[in-house]
Amino acid sequence: MSQPYATTESESNVPTPVTPASTYRLQLRPEFPFAAAEAAVPYIASLGVSHLHLSPVLEAVPGSAHGYDVTDHSRVRGELGGEPGLRALARTARAHGLGLVLDIVPNHMAVPTPLRLNGPLWEVLRDGPASPYARWFDIDWEAGGGQVLLPVLAGPADSCELRADGEVLRYGEQEFPLREGTAGLALPELLAAQWYRPAWWREARTDLNYRRFFTISDLIGVRVEDPEVFAATHAKVLELVRDGVAQGLRIDHVDGLADPREYLGRLRAAAGDGCWVVVEKILARHERLPPAWPVAGTTGYDALHRVDGVFTDPAGAAELADRYGRSTGLPQWPEAARACAREVLTGDLAAELAALERQAGPELSEAVRELLIAFPVYRPYPGDPELPSQALEQAAAAAGPGAVAGVRELLLRDPAFAARFAQTSAALRAKSLEDRAFYRYAPLLSATEVGGEPGHPAVSAEEFHAYCAALARDWPGAGTVLSTHDTKRSADVRARISALSQAPELMGSPAGPDPHLAWMARQTALGLGRVPEAVPRLADALLKAVREAALHTSWTDQDEGYEAGIPAYVPAPLDLPAELAEAARANLLGMTLLHLAMPGVPEVYQGAETEYRALVDPDNRRPAHFPRTALARLDAGAAPDGPAEEKLALTAAVLRLRRDRPELFRGYAPVPVRGAAAGHLVAFTRAPGLLVAATRLSHRLAASGGWRDTRLHLPPGKWTPALPSHSRPSPPHPRPSHSGATDVAALLDGRPVGVWLRR
């Protein structure tokens, strides 16, 4: 490989690149352990990526399908093969030219069953505030009357069978530690004497007194802002970095931390400058990553929104929104988002709100609530005196300017209040937008994706170019993604749904007692299409969607009668009409190419190098399919057999260019397009000699008469196609070259996308 390398030490004494050329995400689980990942290494290396990105590898709840429920930071997960298995994977990866990127979870740990698996939490529950581990967790002992609320009971405590058994308290198969000296007490006195109070799970909504991940009480927040807690929870990960097992880190939910900048500074100092670090940070469309953070950038949801948006027709999206509103009677996006924020804050996050209101005092409680609801981004950061004027104005209109000014002053002078306000704000945005409003507002489901803006889903070519230029200038090593373990629909599904924005009339008027559900069912079915087990997969996704939307049923208050009617809304697998299927193909190839060629470090989700139609988790965490045979056929010179192999051929070609010729992927410059259909082409160059072009809104393009006189004004030089032709006779004719003002129709030669190199 011709990639530039830094000189970091490793087990095999081979240097690794500081910034990956690209990454490939693998979802590890007991059914797909380190050994299975190791077996996939030769294929993944042949695809052209430079790094494997592994889901969390530290000890987690037994059987966990994701690993974000960490129980022990000091050990590599035994169910995956333990530390020997991870180090063997790293050695095999290095032998094939690949590095490893680890996904780490600093914000929270599991409250597992059995509870003993979380040793620090077990000791806190046994020994109380005097435990040396009490500093690990954000526990408000005063609010709980000196006890930690444990929402683990199936019903009210007086209806549940709790019993002492030696040095533990038992409830079914669960056990909890007994405070020293209390084992012989009668049950009422014994419960009152503990450092915790077992409670009905419903009490968590209002009375929980520890910080958690979003609204998930089974995940307790960790105080990594404490240097000793940071050292203890990061020792194993940093050892793996120092030993060269890992060359990069993905930081999960960085906005959950008290002070992300301080944390990242400590992590950077400990991991060294040679470690590539990106943060899972959801940026609003107008928001920018704080420039002082010592990271390469975000994990890439901001890029996903721009790539999706440039293939969304604004006029059609607006028409769909109008049709949806008339069909369902539900409010438009701004009202839906605000309503969901208010519901979640005063309902699901009532305990977190109450804690903030106690800190602020009764005279400021309403202003705290209104400022949280109005906040337009995920959270503020400690020491930042500027709050968004929009949020201040909206909150002041509801709570009064004096009260809002009081909260602003409190945020500036009280670091503890500021941290908790910011952490609550992040949880509120995630829960109210991603997990509620995105399911409640559904005119165009491809737009309801993490980091998206459903009220304004379309992105112009000019806005896309401006974003890419800023990314190349400010965060060239940031991650970019299209499909992840958290996307509600894979890129292939979104490409099919977004094609509807070019032909909104094809949505029709979905009928049924619940038009909202009927609308979601039809779009989801069109997006998924004819795939294995389509009907049960659709049914599962729709059930999750209606519970998240919380219009008729929810996770905590399930309406069995309503849910029993969901299967009636599940249509048989739906094909897109032929002309729209072609538009979906153009969308997907265009999205794939822009993602792989734009600034940043592109990530391919497991199996998504070929056709990958997946819905929300757990559907998107099914076992990966690696198209080894198809890639071998293509490499032998065969023509792609259908859209799946067409996507695979494109992906491998660009990934291999990134790996073998990294000098081609520097800088960014839009290429001017002139003519009647200029708005249908996105074209740019990467320095010094890579040209990329992708067709957008191809259905509208065909309806308007095609490219006609549209010309692309190429930069100086002769430009030769870089993608495999698969259609030329053998021996091949000399490949055509282009220069100057070139007809787009001739340049693309019937394809929706193209890549050229300057001779």
Image (tube, rainbow, N blue to C red):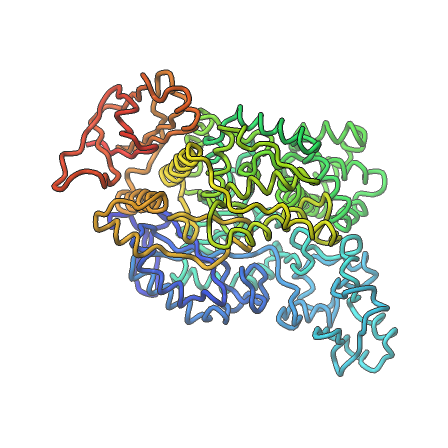
Q: Residue furthest left?
A: 731
Residue 379 in view, yes or no: no
Left or right of 723? Residue 599 is right
In this rendering, is residue 62 above or below 570? Answer: below
For image coordinates 48% across by 61% down, the residue present is 237
Left or right of 582? Residue 141 is right
Q: Position of residue 164 (x, y in %)?
A: 79, 79
In this rendering, is residue 629 above or below 60? Answer: above
Q: Position of residue 423 (x, y in %)?
A: 66, 47
Left or right of 329? Residue 641 is left
Residue 701 in view, yes or no: yes
In this rendering, is residue 581 above or below 609? Answer: above
Q: Position of residue 389 (x, y in %)?
A: 67, 28
In this rendering, is residue 270 above or below 460? Answer: below
> Which quadrant of the structure image shows residue 61?
bottom right
Q: Which quarter of the rendered picture does the C terminus lie within?
A: top left
